Amino acid sequence: MEKDVAYVVKGEGEGEGVGEEEEEEEEEEEEEEIDEGDGGRGRRRRSRRVSYLRPCVSTRSHSLVKRFDGIYTGPYFDSNSPTNITAQLGSHAYLPCKVRQLGNKSVSWIRRRDSHILSVDRTMFIPDERFQAIFADASDTWTLQVKYVQARDEGEYECQISTDPKKSHIIKLNIVVPKIEILGDRDMYVKTGSTVAIRCMIKQSLEGPFYVFWYHEGDRVLNYQQGKIDIQTKRIDHDTVSSLVIRNARREDSGNYTCSPSNLDSASVQLHVLNGEHPAAIQRGISSAPGGCHTFWWFVGVVTLYSSHGSRNYILVLLAIMVLYSKNPSYFTPER
């Protein structure tokens, strides 16, 4: 582990012994061999003063010691601090800000879009409990945590040191919003007794959802309903696919089915289980009525024209047409 060394800076009110190391001088003696002539040899002693640093114990506040780390003499941002963070909608975002040599200064987080002060050190100034300032002493990192991120959380956040002038580091938070869709048409038509497969795809996601729930008319569909229901969710590359399989479909299985992933929007489909009905007639529904009405009155006009000389026959034919129309209007609706 790298040792953080501080040195005494005199002339700023510090006394002797302040800091973690201090300079000390001692006198050292050394001998050297000399030539005394006529082949004689001798030794001579001489002394010199040497200086060195020795550890010392500080009895004063840490704020009295001015730290040196490379070329910096005060608080500064670590060059490894990121400038862009990407998080998925509904997940947790972490914005780390590494501040070296903070000393007695403070670190604040500010939301740039509205200049709202979110925190000063560990104290929060926003009622939204999703925001929290976390400090890791081992790495000198002040992290802004945003839980369950929303689309409106996207933007720039400022990590600020309370120096004069202020020092700031900007981090851009990007929010990825996955797309959710049910494959196929919004209306599904199947025959009674069929096996139905409804597939829900979650695209452009950084991570898969913790769960995907299915609902039928607002009630949760369970995976173990008498072997009739089967739900499977798989992660394929950057997409998640959840499949709902209904075996031996019955009329009571008709209705709205909703795919609801955790912390994301939902998608729905309408299932129609038919028992001999014609799907086209159900699809047209009320929208086919105007065409049916026009066709009906066209028939009435033709009958009136050809029955102008026999009122009794006209009335009988007209009644027959009205009964037929009431039983099945699709007979009078042109195929599209």
Image (cartoon, rainbow, N blue to C red):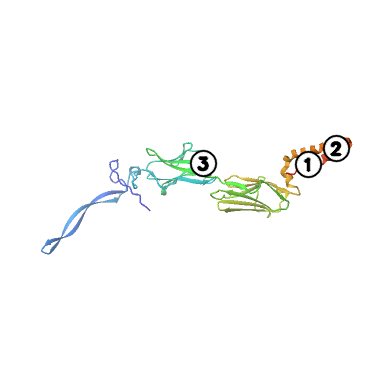
- Of mark 3 and mark 1, the one earlier in the sequence is 3
Residue at position x 74%, y 38% in the image: 290
Mark 1: amino acid: Phe
Residue 146 showing in the rendered view = no
Residue 64 showing in the rendered view = yes
| Residue 240, position as x, y percentages in the image | 58, 51
Looking at the rendered structure, the secondary structure element under dot 2 is: helix
Mark 3: amino acid: Asp
Query: Is 304 located above or below residue 246 in the figure?
Result: above
Q: Which mark is residue 306?
A: 2
| Residue 149, position as x, y percentages in the image | 53, 43
Q: CA distance from mark 3 to mark 1?
A: 57 Å
Mark 2: amino acid: Tyr
Task: State the residue position of label 3.
Answer: 153
Q: Nearer the viewer, residue 194 or 53?
A: 194
Contact flag, marks 3 and 1 (Cβ < 8 Å): no
| Residue 43, position as x, y percentages in the image | 16, 60
Looking at the rendered structure, the secondary structure element under dot 3 is: helix
Characterize the local packing of mark 3: few (<14), some (14-19) or many (20 or more) Cα atoms within 10 angstroms: some
Looking at the rendered structure, the secondary structure element under dot 1 is: helix
Q: Quadrant of the C terminus?
A: top right
| Residue 291, position as x, y percentages in the image | 75, 39
- Observer-side mark, 2 or 1, equals 2
- Of mark 3 and mark 2, the one earlier in the sequence is 3
Residue at position x 60%, y 51% in the image: 241
74 displayed left or right of 327: left
Q: CA distance from mark 3 to mark 2?
A: 74 Å
Q: In which quadrant of the rendered view does residue 77 lie?
A: top left
